Image (tube, rainbow, N blue to C red):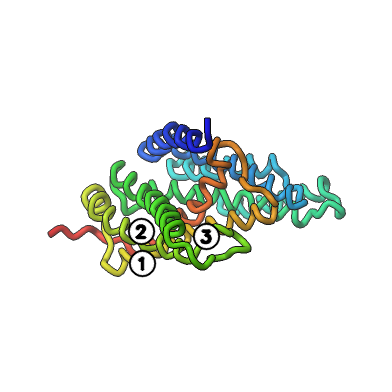
Amino acid sequence: MGELGKRVVVAVLGAPVAILALWWGDAPLATLLAIFAALGAREYCRLASASGVRAFVRVAVATAALVPLAVHGEAVGAVRAPPAVWPLVPLAVLALAIWRRPPGERPLEASAATVMAVLYTAVPLSALYGLRTHPYAVGRTAGFVVALLPLVLTWASDIGGYVAGRTIGGRKLLPSVSPGKTVAGAVGGVLLTVAATVALERWLLVPYAQLGFTPTGRVAFGVAVSVVAQVGDLAESLLKREAGVKDSGAVFPGHGGALDRLDSLFFVAPTAVVLYDLLLIPAIRG
């Protein structure tokens, strides 16, 4: 099977699982996010290792998986962790380095890479759970739509960038980081995302969540999502360039690793939480 065939098979099998988990929310969504967070943290540690830094892989993977589950536990009242618990995590990692990473094995960088593996993957994915349970979204359908919108807009940005970049070409955006990306592609991604925001607000957000944006908020939301999605993609490209690898992993045949699939979402999900708080308004029917 060729690369295109593998990509299609993975998308056909994986997309329904992700959509169903997003629709259901609660424990199924938290579990799926925990799996992706663990995979992403493992790949991040792999990239660090390729750069000569030996992160604490097991600690990073276990902690990354725990974060979305803890967020779900807090949401349903099953867990009541004091806020002071989370600052103890990086301190515990640094303490572990005393015994496991002598000065010659770069303990500072090993500790930093371990903590960053969790911050880069698990925390942003937990923001997706926050979107699904956003206080503005009343009911399962509204929560699903509110969480789905940033995901679809992320895909729109990627498609718009790909089509415009291939069709127009021209000046490279950041050739030292991602040689294939162009300025035209970046602009195309923004334009399609704004257009998709307008359409999805009308067809999904207003009728199914009774929420919307002002005209200015509509444009601001689309532009911001596309920009941070592209920054997320470039950030992961930067990590891979330093590590000297093409893909972050091979967990998804034809697609690469978890970081390759979720790089934009890591930036979009927490940004969408903030933008919703600033820009969402009750829908005005008329």
Query: Badge 1 is on which residue?
Result: 220
Q: Which mark is residue 192?
A: 2
Percent coordinates x, y for residue 258 in the rendering: 56, 43
Query: Badge 3 is on which residue?
Result: 181
What whole-number distance in Å separates the C-alpha atoms at marks 1 and 2? 13 Å
Crowdedness near tag 2: few (<14), some (14–19) or many (≥20) residues, C-alpha within 10 Å: many
Crowdedness near tag 3: few (<14), some (14–19) or many (≥20) residues, C-alpha within 10 Å: many
Q: Residue at x 68, y 42 (%)?
A: 59
Q: Mark 1 or mark 2, which has the lower sequence index? A: 2
What whole-number distance in Å separates the C-alpha atoms at marks 3 and 2? 16 Å
- Give the structural element (helix, strand or loop) at label 2: helix
**Mark 3 or mark 1, which is nearer to you?**
3
Q: Residue at x 61, y 49 (%)?
A: 118
Is 52 positioned to the left or the right of 245 in the image?
A: right
The residue nearer to you, when weighing 207 against 139, is 207
- Give the structural element (helix, strand or loop) at label 3: strand
